[in-house]
Image (cartoon, rainbow, N blue to C red):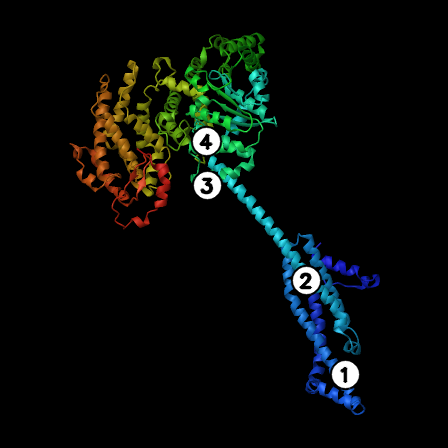
Amino acid sequence: MDAWELGVQKHLASLPPAERKAFMAPATVDDCMVKIHAVRHRHRQIYHRLVEKLRPVIEPLQRFQGAIDVACQVSPSLMSPVWGPIRAVITLASDRIATLQTLSLFLERLVEPLKRFETYENVFGDNPTLRSAIGALYCDLIDFCTRTVRFYGKSSVRTIFGSFDREFREVSDNIRHHWTEIDIAANFVHITQASAIRKAEEERRQIQVRGDIQRWLSPATVSDDLAKYSAGCMEGSCDWFFYTDHCEALVSSPSSHAVRIVGRPGQGKTTLSAWIISRFLRKPHKQVLYFFCKASDPEKRQGIHVLRTLLSQILRLHEECYVPIEKWYQSSGRPVADSYSEICDALLNLLPRITQKPTLVIIDAIDECSEPQELITTLQKCQSMAPGPFHIILTSRDYPDLQPLFKFVDGTLSFPVKFTDDAIGRYVASRVSELDFAVGKGLSNEVARAVTRASDGLWLYARLALDELSQASSPSEVRRLSQSLPVGLRSLYNTMLSSSESRFTEVQIRIAQEIFIWIDGADYMPWWHFHSDDILEDNALTQLIQFANGGEEVFNPVRLIQKLCFPLLNVLYTTVNGESCPFAANFVHYSAEQYIQWTSDADTRLLPRVLQRRKLRRLYRGLTAAWYFTKSEDFRNVLQELRNDPYGNGVGAYFEMAYGMGDSWHMTSLPDNLSEDDKQAVTEVCGPLISYITTTECIGWAEAAILINYAGGFTNLLENVQKAVDILAGKDFDNTVPAWRDYVKARRIFFTDFTYILKVTGPGYNAWDRSSAVMPDGFEEREVATAILALGRRYKHYVDEAPKLTGLSGETIEAQDVTGKNSVTREWQRRRSSQEKFGHAG
């Protein structure tokens, strides 16, 4: 109900029943004011004519009224009969004029407040006190309207002798009183709402700051890990942990307690960690912080990743801690907290502020953290700083070289053999019962016993073995495979890959070989590269498949990769640098990554065919990259985009291929223990690589590298070229393979020429360096050298226009002399923003 309706009801309540039935209230405030003005105006016109006629007589008499009154008192018998009626007329006329003037002035003064009160109602209409006050004034206004109509509705004589003060003073006083009350109420509401607005604004600011702090911390996606690993836990398989004395200490000990859980790769440490986390999260009397380390994930393998995530979890549990942590965020000045000491100090400063509720910290696979000692030292400091019990659970492999890291723990737990074997037995029996050959009970039991025995306590082995058995096409094949199960994960991987590739075509084998050559990005990509080290994205994967498939695309690359690279790789849909990636491939488990690394030095003849190129992977990467830079449609598009805009972002698979090629150029020797087949492979690969750098085939790559580095003012190309010159100069190389020797010679010439080209045209040199550069012997006779020099001169204007920039090596690159003609049109901000993305092309 609005204020006008309240006013109408209040006025009706004050009327007698008879008048209440007959009363017709105006519809709105405006209607009420219109009615008052109409009545006033009508009667003003009636009396205006009379007053105008009498004005010439009345005004002089008014001036002498006092003197005539005195004269009347002196001679009452003579003057009174004449002056009395005249004086009455003067008084009545003057009162009438005063009444109209008073009414007009009152209405004029009421117009602006009514507009203000209407605004109050619109703005503060939800406030009942203000709405009631405005309703009271509207009730007075209706009363005023009623009295005005009644006053001017009297007979002429009664109107003339009526009194404004008697009729209107009470209601006008009420209006002024309620008028004041409304302003007071509105002021109070304004103050209250302003306070509420300030409070809401502060709450919004806090939410914004909290979001900014969380983005600054960039916590890892450990909640996703927890859900994933918890889903893979078999019911009852981890119950043994709750029966240990260490678990009892973690639950009830008033002092801090630390325990280490050890196990072999694939034994279920991560699943156990997820199970423990889930169980303790259900206990309201404990606060749980956790992290899953993963060496192959660039966001989950450093100590700072762990601390940032733990700090983020503390803030979510204790929102009051955002206030003290804000000063660390404000003083950082960085978009992401990348200082270990800064985050460590913030965490240690925050811990004494949290409640004395027991805290449990669980770090899974801490041995996969790149700085485990530093992280463990920080956790020990946390134990001493926390106000209550600060319990720690760490899981790792049981490697002897890790033992010194865990001297501080109160005890070490291993997976109980009998309990684990029984749990794996139940898991295997359950899986076997779902397979096609389960109709034969004898065979099912035989397979279940064989897999359980071969698993030797490794859950991963049991799962992979059953995945392999599920591919069998007949009971006899199932029996044969179950009777010849390999020992250990490495042998199992070998067996599974060999079995799978027997069903592959030659093209499919070549595709698998390419993917396994390139999957370990940390082997050839720089550590500061913006991609994940061990994640191959769709751009690179598509090019590898096309190269192995004669340049043609395949219908369903995701399904093909899953088929060819099982059980080592997983195909996933992810985001890289905040951008959606259609698909990517990475290792399914750390043991798979270790296996791939082992194959790099293993005897080629003992490996499945899909892995036999791993020993010469650096040369094979160069061969793939040479194809990419000469025949790939993807690179042609990249090069055209760079020509149009060297500061743009369309890079395709350029960087993976550029660094793969660079890795082959930086080889100083061939691997040890090459078989004759390996040496023949070296000869076959070195031929195309020599042709690539001794002919104009490499011009496409050279132009792209020059555009990126010259436009960005980067010295990375120069550093990589100089590195090749240094490692190839003055050293003896393996002469057992003539083609390798020729490849070394070709690289020496190529990079010596390229160094000269960069000295005279590229970034990082001043005018004196350019003038003192010495052209290598035979330079002008080498077609590829002169062609690349022409490219350097064509794009040298980018170097001349470049501002002072800092390269990724940390050195300042001095700006060259600027002509001023074109520099004003360059988008330096885009250049700086692209530096992070392009400052690594070589």
**Which mark, by number, is residue 530?**
none
**Mark 2 or mark 4, which has the lower sequence index?**
2
**Which mark, by number, is residue 179?**
2
What amino acid does circle 3 point to? Gln
Residue 282, image x, y percentages: 60, 26
What amino acid does circle 4 point to? Cys
Residue to which mark 3 is pinned: 330
Residue to which mark 4 is pinned: 344
Residue to which mark 1 is pinned: 88
Q: Which residue is drawn at 79% across and 74% down?
A: 154
Q: Which residue is drawn at 63% across and 65% down?
A: 112
Q: In which quarter of the image is residue 166?
A: bottom right
**Mark 4 or mark 3, which has the lower sequence index?**
3
Q: Residue at x 73, y 61 (%)?
A: 139
Q: Which of 762 and 536 is in front in this view?
A: 762
Residue 695, image x, y percentages: 23, 31
Q: Are marks 3 and 1 in contact (CB under 8 Å)?
A: no
**Mark 3 or mark 1, which has the lower sequence index?**
1
> How dense is the environment of label 3, judged by Cα within 10 Å: few (below 14), some, or many (20 and up)?
few
Q: Are marks 4 and 3 in contact (CB under 8 Å)?
A: no
Q: Do the residues labelled 4 and 1 touch (CB within 8 Å)?
A: no
Q: Marks 2/4: CA distance? A: 62 Å
